[in-house]
Image (cartoon, grey):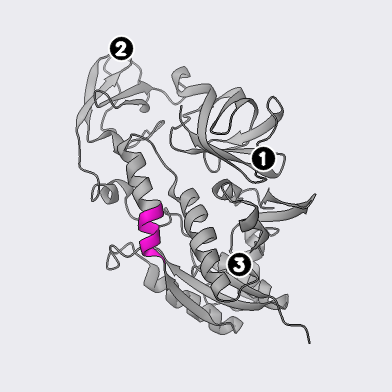
Amino acid sequence: MMKKKRVVIGMSGGVDSSVAALLLKQQGYDVVGLFMKNWEDDDTDEYCSSKRDLIDAASVSDVIGIPLEAVNFSAEYKEKVFSKFLDEYKLGQTPNPDVLCNAEIKFKAFLDHAIELGADFIATGHYAQIRKFNGMCQLLKGEDGTKDQSYFLYRLNQRQLTNTLFPIGHLYKSDVRKIAQDFNLPNHSKKDSTGICFIGERPFREFLSRYLPHEPGEIRTQEGKIIGEHIGLMYYTIGQRQGLGIGGTKGGLDEPWFVLEKVMTNNTLIVVQGHDHPKLFQPKLSASDLTWVSGKAPHCGWVYSAKTRYRQTDAPCSIEEISKAKCKIEFAQPQWAVTPGQSVVIYESKVCLGGGIITK
């Protein structure tokens, strides 16, 4: 009798990874659940849900009939993800820790650990798909466009994709919920997590202040007029409206203010009025720290599409210049609030080609 292929699946306690595990079991795989603990600085904090999540993952594993192991990657997380996250914030960037977490923890530390457990594959509950094409693995968008998570996975390489399964990538979220309900999974109605991977649902500014001291400075208009004080440039991002503490100008526009620029040299926050202020739109950007899913850069000049933030509508673009380290991207229509430190992810139709970190 042929031995079953073993799949080690990351189980977060949420409905997506739970249904992914169920589907793998139904498909005949030898399934092992793995609960990853990536953060432990404040386990007693009201926003930390890891204990509850572990209980949910264990309950689901019991119903499905698979073993569950808990593993602590918090040391690796602090070194590979969180330290880089803080370093970027100190430089005035706005990094995306979920991108780093996927590349360094979920598809590296987790993959290595799973292989030690005898895994043929790892699996997660991401809304993304993998397709074999010309002997290579392509990373495709999830079928549910409102839940597609390929943006967070663009740094994955061929080795990682070859050993990965995304069991729910072809499903819509409503289907996933229905499957969970039909099989009486105990977390079928559990609310989706919306927080950053280690921060959870807590107020972000309050969290950041534990690690980065306040460095107040002036808030100025483009013309140089002082209209307020900020608490530290690292607490703001391009296009931010909330939390500026400034109202409309007397005798001027009554529109809200938005962050346009962070001037690190003199610790000044530059703001403009109105969501559609022309200075908030950029026709092109530069990116560095490039990674390509195929291992090879795409052709320059071709028509692609790109996202400069998650949940953004794909924007038609062309790659104007590319080297091993950097690329320049030009958009058909100027893009709103392009933010240094965020990822620009490039697509050819449904295929995620890769991307890089926006520098300007």
- Magenta segment, prevailing SS (helix, strand or loop): helix
Q: Which of marks 2 and 3 is nearer the N terminus?
A: 3
Q: Are marks 2 and 1 in contact (CB under 8 Å)?
A: no
* Cα–Cα gap, marks 1 and 3: 24 Å
Question: 10 Å neighbourhood of mark 1: few (<14), some, or many (≥20)?
Answer: few
* Cα–Cα gap, marks 2 and 3: 54 Å
Residue 2 picture location, percent across and down: 77, 83
**Residue 16 occupies which quadrant of the picture?**
bottom right
Of the numbered discs in the image, which one, if any, rests on residue 122?
3
Residue type at the position of mark 1: Lys
**Residue 3 occupies which quadrant of the picture?**
bottom right
Task: Give the number of the mark in front: 2 or 1.
Answer: 1
Residue at 39% over, 58% down: 77
Residue type at the position of mark 3: Ile
Provide the residue designation for mark 1: 296
Residue 201 visible to the viewer: no
Q: Earlier in the sequence, mark 2 or mark 1?
A: 2
* Cα–Cα gap, marks 2 and 1: 45 Å
Is residue 321 in the magenta section?
Answer: no
Q: Are marks 2 and 3 in contact (CB under 8 Å)?
A: no
Q: Which of marks 1 and 3 is nearer the N terminus?
A: 3
Please, what secondary structure does the residue beneath circle 2 have? Answer: loop
Please, what secondary structure does the residue beneath circle 3 have? Answer: strand
Residue 170 visible to the viewer: yes
Is residue 75 in the magenta section?
Answer: yes
Residue at 22% over, 19% down: 226
Residue at 68% over, 32% down: 304
> Where are the magenta residues, as a range?
73-80
Residue type at the position of mark 2: Glu
Provide the residue designation for mark 2: 223
73 vs 20, nearest the viewer: 73
